[in-house]
Image (cartoon, grey):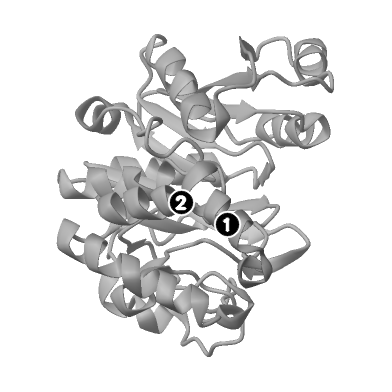
Amino acid sequence: MKTRKIEIVTPVHNRREETLQCLRSLARAESSGLDLHVIIVDDGSTDGTAEAVATQFPDVEIIPSDGSLWYTAGTNRGIQAALRHNPDYVLAINNDSIFDPNCISRLVKRAEHYPRSVVGPLLLDWSTPHKIFQVAPKWDLWRGCYRQWFRQTVWTVPDKAWEVDLIVGNCVLYPVQAIREAGLMDEKRLPQFGDAEYTPRMKRMGWRLLIEPRARVFCKPNDLLTGFRKLSLSKKLDHLFSNKFSPYSFWRRFYGNLGGAPNRFQGLVSMPIYYLRVLAGRNAESLWAATQDEEPLSATYAEAVVESDLDHIA
């Protein structure tokens, strides 16, 4: 296999130690047949992140900004810079990630075997390393959004790659052609959650979305959404309609569902369902959801497993 050029991009804001830890793990990556280059978009960090990276990892490209980008625009600026290097793939990541040494090579091998595929790894909770999170969320109209999984482990997922409807943005390997066809994330309508509709958009354009279970990344998991019902009415309205960066933002949910659902009709219908469930304390992203029974993902996605000759990958 010829050498593949991989541009690794991540936006950063004031997480110096997590960023350095991430870069140390990338430095240990198995890179046979790969040309790896890292781009960091430093969005106004005030904790010395950029200076520390420049000192300890002088080969990392740093793009400065003023703190106004947030996740989506920060990732977009990184992708734009990556495309100028004419890579084969762009690996978009979060900077609170620790990479298994074989992770990137396994993602690339899977993508190479399946043309027109976008590939993600298993995301593992770094405090409970066998526990997965945000992997293979499944659209559920009657929950009003994608269902997340809370009880899945490395032993309950398929042992072969499987096809999904969405790959969360913590770590995604994008073939450059997929980016050229789909464009960038929607930073105007989804400034903090652009990944909610990005890979579903690619899927509608004929790109297969795959999870490679042998590729593993250890991350700090997101907090569960709690406390909305306890807010005052004025704060509820602020979170819903004024604060576009809030996890409770109506517009985040609206545009995320509209672009991330299987079709626009389901995206629209899901909105009242979602908020009725929030008011009832049955939100699919809440503490209630974490108490619900789940069948193993190996059963949920049994029909989505892809067969290949890569099952022997070490």
Q: Residue at x 59, y 28 (%)?
A: 11
Bin the neighbour count of mark 2 within 10 Å (Cα to Cα): few under 14, some 14-19, many 20 and up: many
Bin the neighbour count of mark 1 within 10 Å (Cα to Cα): few under 14, some 14-19, many 20 and up: many
Query: Which amino acid does the dot numbered 2 rest on?
Result: Val
Q: Residue at x 42, y 70 (%)?
A: 275
Are discs 2 and 1 less than 8 Å apart at CB? yes
Side (left or right) of 101 relative to 190 = right
Query: Which amino acid does the dot numbered 1 rest on?
Result: Leu
Q: Answer with mark 2 or mark 1, whichever residue precedes in sequence.
A: 1
Q: Residue at x 53, y 55 (%)?
A: 237
Q: Is residue 282 above or below residue 118?
A: below
Q: Which residue bears the numbered disc 2?
A: 168
Looking at the image, the residue that sits furthest to the front is 234
Looking at the image, the residue that sits furthest to the bottom is 293
Nearest the eye: 251 or 7? 251
Q: Secondary structure at mark 1?
A: strand
Q: Secondary structure at mark 2?
A: loop
| Location of residue 276 in the rendering, given as x and y in whole percent from the top left corner | 42, 76
Q: Which residue bears the numbered disc 1?
A: 123
